[in-house]
């Protein structure tokens, strides 16, 4: 949600939203001029308040940071519709963050127009690709193929994440969910 230049992001779970400002400058002059920032925070036990809430409930946290209630486990501290895990301290309340897009773009220089790209992806994308890497990969794919739509570019990004899962993990480990959507827009002041 964007109102008056403020981007509000609500997140439950371990998905992520990022924004790249000056997204079109990727690859120009051999470098990435885009500034990539997180719009959301994954709700996991890595966050102290999240961990404390789980520890005060009936759940337990394993060495990987997963939350367990009896034989059921998940990798997040907030989830929609998971009534079983509510006894473990998992809640459906989204963590809301605010990003001041106007402030961010105006502190970056004298331009009056900035190209932006927002990526929203599941943990299957961002567990194997960092924020900058996911953004750069999508931009480079879009630049090398004039015929790809943004949706098709996202599909190629998903294929890359799946390839990384297959190459970097033991054969018996399943590939996590790999979903991503992207939005491109220009901010003009």
Image (spheres, helix red, strand yellow):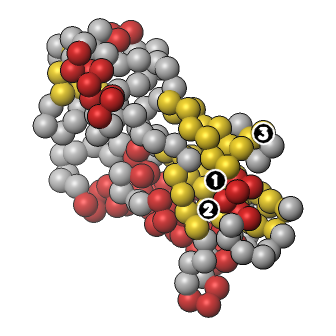
User: Going by the image, does 21 lie left or right of 52?
Assistant: right
What residue lies at 61% left-to-right and 71% top-to-bottom?
34
Relative image position of residue 133 (x, y in whole percent): 46, 66
- Residue 129 lies, with reference to residue 122, above or below; the image says below
Contact between marks 1 and 2 (CB within 8 A): the answer is: yes
What residue lies at 42% left-to-right and 60% top-to-bottom?
130
User: Going by the image, does 158 lie left or right of 171?
Assistant: right
Q: CA distance from mark 2 to mark 3?
A: 18 Å
Residue highlighted by disc 1? 118
What residue lies at 63% left-to-right and 47% top-to-bottom?
99
Q: CA distance from mark 3 to mark 1?
A: 16 Å
Please, what secondary structure does the residue beneath circle 1 have? Answer: strand
Contact between marks 3 and 1 (CB within 8 A): the answer is: no
Tell me which numbered mark, 1 or 2, is placed earlier along the sequence: 2
Please, what secondary structure does the residue beneath circle 2 have? Answer: strand
Q: Nearer the viewer, mark 3 or mark 1?
A: 3
Of 26 and 138, nearer the camera is 26
Of 49 and 69, nearer the camera is 49
Tell me which numbered mark, 2 or 3, is placed earlier along the sequence: 3
Relative image position of residue 76 (x, y in whole percent): 34, 31
- Residue 89 lies, with reference to residue 18, above or below; the image says above
């Amino acid at each position: 949600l964007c109102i008056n230049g403020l981007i509000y992001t609500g997140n439950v779970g371990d998905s992520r939203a990022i924004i790249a400002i000056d997204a079109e400058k990727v690859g120009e002059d051999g470098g990435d001029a885009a500034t990539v920032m997180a719009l959301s925070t994954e709700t996991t036990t890595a966050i102290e308040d999240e961990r404390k809430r789980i520890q005060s409930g009936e759940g337990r946290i394993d060495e990987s940071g997963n939350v367990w209630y009896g034989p059921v486990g998940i990798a997040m501290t907030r989830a929609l519709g998971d009534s079983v895990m509510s006894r473990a301290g998992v809640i459906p309340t989204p963590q809301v963050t605010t990003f001041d897009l106007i402030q961010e773009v105006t502190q970056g220089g004298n331009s009056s127009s900035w190209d932006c790209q927002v990526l929203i992806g599941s943990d299957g994308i961002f567990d194997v690709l960092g924020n900058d890497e996911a953004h750069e990969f999508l931009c480079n794919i879009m630049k090398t193929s004039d015929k790809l739509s943004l949706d098709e570019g996202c599909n190629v990004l998903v294929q890359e994440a799946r390839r990384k899962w297959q190459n970097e993990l033991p054969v018996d480990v399943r590939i996590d969910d790999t979903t991503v959507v992207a939005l491109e827009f220009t901010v003009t002041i």
